[in-house]
Image (tube, rainbow, N blue to C red):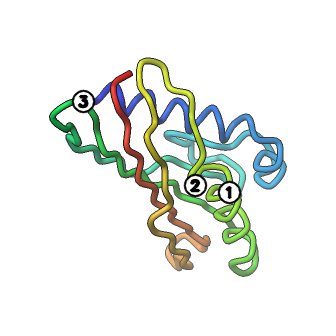
């Protein structure tokens, strides 16, 4: 199951890093699994990932829930919301090529944006659900 999660994250990362529109919105290739403290805003990070056995009597599969975080210091929510919309456009119901696995579906399930007063940043969360089969 863990290798499916790794392959899914690699595929998502490659898609996001390869999108010229997202790169322009972020002011560079700023999609990270883990970020340094000196990265310029805005940027996107991978957050929590959970995966569960989703096997059937005939297929071996996993269900994955993963969250992408959007970080912005812009005045107001617009930049955060625009980046979140781009992430949804790129990923929701889209195919991803994965080594050794087949993506059955990928759906955006939840999105939220809020102002984090402690850090003085807008923080967007967008959660996706993916079903992956061994392939």
- Measure the alpha-carbon separation of dots 1 and 3: 28 Å
Q: Residues within 10 Å of mark 1 (few under 14, many from 20)?
A: few
Residue at screen point 61% across, 72% down: 122
Query: Residue 125: x percent and y percent?
Result: 50, 65
Question: Sequence order check: which comes first, mark 1 or mark 3?
Answer: 3
Question: Sequence order check: which comes first, mark 3 or mark 2?
Answer: 3
* Residue placed furthest toward the front: 58
For the C terminus, the quadrant is top left
Q: Residues within 10 Å of mark 3 (few under 14, many from 20)?
A: some
Badge 3 marks a residue whose secondary structure is loop
- Measure the alpha-carbon separation of dots 3 and 2: 23 Å
Whether residues under marks 1 and 2 lie with C-beta atoms below 8 angstroms apart, the answer is: yes
Q: How many marks?
A: 3
Could you say which quadrant of the image residue 102 lies in? top left
Query: Residue 109: x percent and y percent?
Result: 45, 65
Query: Is 48 located above or below residue 121 in the figure?
Result: above
- Measure the alpha-carbon separation of dots 1 and 2: 6 Å
Query: Residue 40: x percent and y percent?
Result: 72, 51
**Nearest to the observer: residue 107 or residue 8:** 107
**Nearest to the observer: residue 100 or residue 86:** 100
Query: Is 52 located above or below residue 110 in the figure?
Result: above
Question: Which residue lies under the disc numbered 3?
Answer: 60
Q: Residues within 10 Å of mark 2 (few under 14, many from 20)?
A: some
Q: From the viewer's perspective, is 20 left or right of 105?
A: right
Residue at screen point 49% across, 56% down: 107
Badge 1 marks a residue whose secondary structure is helix
1 vs 3, front mark: 3
Identify the mark at residue 89; answer none if there is no mark.
1
Badge 2 marks a residue whose secondary structure is loop
Residue at screen point 54% across, 78% down: 114
Question: Which residue lies under the disc numbered 2?
Answer: 92
């Amino acid at each position: 199951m863990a290798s499916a999660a790794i392959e899914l994250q690699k595929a998502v990362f490659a898609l996001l890093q390869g999108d010229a529109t997202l790169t322009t919105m972020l002011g560079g290739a700023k999609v990270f699994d883990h970020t340094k403290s000196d990265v310029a805003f805005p940027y996107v990070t991978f957050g929590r990932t959970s995966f569960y056995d989703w096997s059937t009597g005939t297929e071996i599969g996993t269900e994955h829930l993963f969250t992408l975080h959007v970080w912005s210091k812009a005045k107001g929510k617009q930049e955060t919301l625009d980046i979140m919309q781009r992430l949804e456009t790129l990923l929701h119901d889209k195919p991803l090529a994965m080594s050794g696995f087949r993506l059955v579906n990928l759906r955006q399930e939840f999105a939220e944006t809020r102002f984090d007063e402690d850090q003085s940043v807008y923080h967007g969360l967008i959660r996706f659900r993916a079903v992956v089969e061994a392939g």
